[in-house]
Image: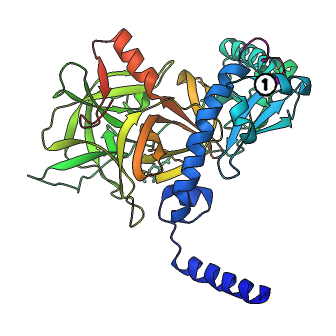
Amino acid sequence: MRIYFLIVLLSLLQSYSIYAEQDHPLAKLWGVEDNEVPKLLENERNLIAIDKILKSILEQDNFISSFGGSVIFPKENIITVNTVDFSKVDDLLALPQINPHKDFLSFDKAENSMSLSQLIYNFDQIAFQASSIRPNQTIIYTDLESNNNVIYIFNRDINNSEFIEAIKPYNPKIIYENINSPPVSQNITQLRRDFNPRNLKIKLLSGDGLYNNGLFCSAGFWATDRFDPNDFYVITAGHCYNNEITNTEFYYAPWRYDLPSDLLIGRMVFHMTDPYDFGIINHVNKDVIPTFSVRNDVTTKYRELTITDSAPVTSVGAHICRSGRTSYFSCGYVLGFNGRNYGYTIGIKKDLIITDMPAERGDSGGPILSFVSPQNLYSVVVHGIFFGGGRILNAAQSIDIIFKELGENTIYDLTLYTGGSSS
Ligand SMILES: *[C@@H]1O[C@H](CO)[C@@H](O)[C@H](O)[C@H]1NC(C)=O
Ligand SMILES: *[C@@H]1O[C@H](CO)[C@@H](O)[C@H](O)[C@H]1NC(C)=O
Ligand SMILES: *[C@@H]1O[C@H](CO)[C@@H](O)[C@H](O)[C@H]1NC(C)=O
């Protein structure tokens, strides 16, 4: 009887795997079948909600020296709380905001015994040294999972020894990318143009290619003037504008074409690269149609995703994805939120979202997003735009900072375009 049951079970599993599909980006990321994605996404949404409550408590004075932050694990359906002082666990669990969620919490010894207050203090000291020494081609951020601050150095051949010496007292984890190719700067090529859709309207999706004076980039998302919904803008990275040539015209550069098109989108009317990296292109060509869709045409399904809203990234361990002209669509995990990038030629960038999703040159400016609805696997929220990075980790600029900077320091008071459905 039991053996028969096992055989039935095995044959069920077998037929299941024959028909199993892995079209959804999250199925690939999590290594599951498409039909398991809604359940895992629901778990993740729940963990993020609990983690928000937990984070605000762990940052309070009476806990900040006892715990080293939290990381969510959607597949295991658990939040690990890095613990320095186990005698405080009962106090935390006794709180009425935390107690109902105690089954989702796992208290693990903080790997380096660093509390949040220690991590923050060390990060501030490292950032202070970095602003005065100005290390070259380096990202720093707090990595809650490894319970330490991370210094990521793109190129071992650059002499950053003064900086590395100065930050030794704070014991950060130093990661060398160990490749010799020059990062960030882009390839300028001479072009012939061949994609030429005369009399043809195109929809410009988030993630589509942009071209400005030898530089390829990706479109982040469409925004409109807060008071004039017919005044459209494309948000992309500030470094997509070629400062050396100073022509503000941006052209459409379709995926899978080596060359850009003759289709003008509009002119970049504002850009900055320090301490934030974004630019805005004012839409002038009415043959280019604004959308609130993200391109993902690398599988047969989920080819166009729908932007329903924007949101900040709040949990380490949550999934995060991007779309862009060079490496199309990919997903990874959130590693941190307080990233800073230092470089001699590109200045300092602050408040970067740090992730491990793969990306390449030319993906800059593309949207950073995540899936939000277990009921609608096409629905995404935008977190920001892709900035750049290396082989092991990448950084993104968050959307709330972009709108805040524009609103406070320019004449452009913009809001995310979602077709009037929300936001
Ligand atoms: C920083 O890196 C750039 C690009 O590799 C290089 O040209 C420059 O000389 C470096 N500066 C220092 C101080 O190492
Ligand atoms: C690296 O720079 C330091 C000073 O910042 C200098 O003392 C050292 O000799 C340099 N090392 C190399 C290999 O150039
Ligand atoms: C730039 O692109 C051209 C044409 O694709 C290629 O031949 C060249 O090696 C590239 N240069 C760099 C620095 O990537």
Q: Start and end of the magenta stretch?
A: 60-67
Q: Position of residue 233 (x, y in %)?
A: 26, 30
Residue appearing at x 30%, y 22% in the figure? 414
Q: Nearer the viewer, residue 392 or 329?
A: 329
State the count of labels. Answer: 1
Q: Is residue 150 visible?
A: no
Q: Nearer the viewer, residue 212 or 360?
A: 360
Q: Position of residue 279 (x, y in %)?
A: 36, 26
- Judge left or right: residue 369 versus residue 226: right
Q: Main secondary structure of the magenta part?
A: loop
Q: Does 115 appear above or below 5?
A: above
Q: Residue 325 magenta-drawn?
A: no
Residue appearing at x 39%, y 55% in the figure? 296
Quadrant occupied by the C terminus: top left
Residue appearing at x 55%, y 48% in the figure? 42
Q: Nearer the viewer, residue 32 or 346?
A: 32
Pick out the residue farthest to the front.
1
| Number of other residues with Cα within 10 Å of mark 1, as a class: few under 14, some 14 to 19, many 20 or more | few
Secondary structure of the residue carrying tag 1 is helix
Q: Position of residue 168 (x, y in %)?
A: 85, 22
Quadrant occupied by the N terminus: bottom right
Residue appearing at x 63%, y 39% in the figure? 47
The residue under label 1 is 94
Image quadrant where residue 8 sits: bottom right
